[in-house]
Image (cartoon, helix red, strand yellow):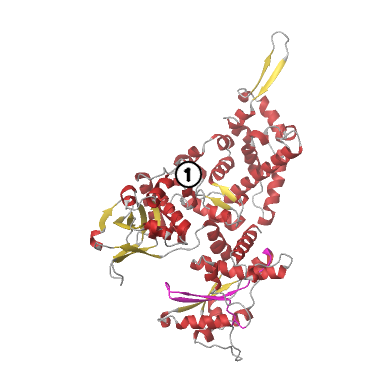
Amino acid sequence: MIKYKTLVNILDNLCLEAPENLKTYHPDVSEPEAQDYARGRAFIHLFLKVRFGLLDFKERESYVTDGADDGGIDAYYIEAESKTVYLIQSKFRTNSGNFESKQIKLEEILKIDADRVSTGETTNEEGVSYNGKIQKMLEAFKDVPDMARYKWQIIILANLTGTKPTDLRKLTGGFSCTVFNFERTYDDLVFPVVSGTFFNVADLFIKLNLTNKELSQSRITYPVTTEQATSNITIIFVPTLEIAKVLHRYKNSVLRFNPRSYLDLKTNPVNREIAGTITEKKSNEFALFNNGITILSDETDLSEKIGQKETGQLYIKNPQIINGGQTAYTLCRIFEERRESEQRLSVFQDKEVMLKVITLPPGQTDNDRKLQLIEAISKATNQQTAVSEADRRSNDKVQIELQKNIFSTFGYFYERKRGEFLDGLEQGYIDNGKIISRNLVLRVSCALKGRASEARRQSEKKLFEKSSFDTLLDDSTDYRGIMFGILCLEHLNSLERNLALSTQDRYGTAKYGYGLRYGKYAIVTAVCKTRPPSSPINEFEGSVKAETEKVLSKWTQFESQVMREPHNSAYFWRTKDPETGEETAFADFDGYYKGRTANQDLRSFKFVPTL
């Protein structure tokens, strides 16, 4: 349900991108059928945006062909890079149940006139002309000079199970077919657009300025052998405007192996100094003052024979910026503020930045080797912003898997990199309540392991140190247990907010003791110790609340017992007035829940009856 709501938020926001004169995308809220139709059209926009990187609404709309006499084709796209023509059919469902279960009818697939349009037919089998948009599509095919080299691919945006690929080919007249069911929609369309990783660049081409210089004078190439890999290093100066355009288009997709995310980079005060060197100077001090950018590549090529005078080209395969993200981000922001005017973009004129391209040879391009190399470079390179331990751990395999599992199962977004989902927040796709911080995940993991006092006491820096981190998250990490603990904390925070609004006892001390005020992680430890082995996802949240309430009902009893334990005398004691003989009790629950004995007490107390 959560993932479907996120999808609908995205579709509604895509509708808002439409010009006001396109009334289809701006339905009256009192007309649910019109609203559903708008979302169905926006669903096609989502696919075009994520799969092909089409950022402009009008450009995407030009590929939408949905309507009467559309030959069963709702949209298309001609991808020159892969030399593929995509024909798209979409069936959006208007509630989460149908979206995740209702199948597309095979008759709908039979309606796709792929065979006829691929041979240039302008009418269907009954002789009825295709609509105007299909006619424009056919004209677009004619404009492709090497169309004979293109493959044809049908995309089905709908659920389709139990049909073999060979049977699909028969239904489509022999065309290859790819199905985006509800799971693939969530994983490959929704998550990427929220995290800003939706368009992956396989081949990057960067123009080089060769005015008054030759390519051989502009680069240094050097082979180097390291413990991780044997690599080639190419150092070359490239126009700052080219780097700005790269980050504007690809954002987090070219920062996958960077310790930080695209929007986390904006918080650095160094940005102002970097920007000033571009916007306030006419000469090329930027190349002199800036440390440059490091990009990882699987294949690199340089050429000055591209048919343009005084211009060369740098080719990078599967580029990833692993250092200098701050520089790239700042250049991108300057570009975004000025891109509407060529005159304003003149601030980039003749200003270049040093680019270091590390090319891994074939056979050494797997992610494990990349991550080893990235970690070594991050430690050794004098970056403009220090890399924290939490940043350094952000690309660990266990964190990537945890993020994937939490979203796929629960629809929440685990933020392993700071600011990773700010794009989704700023676009209105999600709210803060659906984002789980990495600091919280490690504290809950600590509580799950019975270390409630450390969960409350340890600093984030300490938790993310490798010696600590490796004890908290590993390949056997129970992501369901972590979500159980996180939802338990959400319930406790909700109780606290309600108490603050409705009573004078804002922490509920009379009912819950000092648990809500100081001992939330201790409660999480107790709740997760008693939780059922597994709960169906649709009952998960209810199970969390039920188990939490059971533990809370025993909490004052728990605190009464620990106050009497001799080993807790440092936190609970009595003093007697020598003159009156009156005794006064003192309790330091703040210190106790951060102390060394709480974990032991939580292990020994029976929160649920022994069977």
**Which sits in the foreground, 32 or 194?**
32
Judge from the rendering whether residue 584 lies leftward or rightward of residue 459; answer left or right.
right
Q: Residue at x 63, y 37 (%)?
A: 522
Q: In this view, does 19 lie to the left or right of 274?
A: right
282 lies above or below 130: above
Of all residues, the one furthest to the front in this rendering is: 343
The kind of secondary structure element at disc 1 is helix
Label 1: which residue?
Answer: 390
| Camera sees residue 120 | yes
Total numbered circles: 1
Q: Position of residue 537 (x, y in %)?
A: 66, 56
Whether the magenta-drawn stretch holds residue 73 is answered as: yes
Residue span colored magenta: 69-96
Q: Residue furthest bottom?
A: 127
Q: Where is residue 366 in the image (x, y as percent from the top left)?
A: 39, 59
Relative depth, front residue between 208 and 191:
208
Residue 362 shows in the view: no
Q: Which amino acid does label 1 sit on?
A: Ala
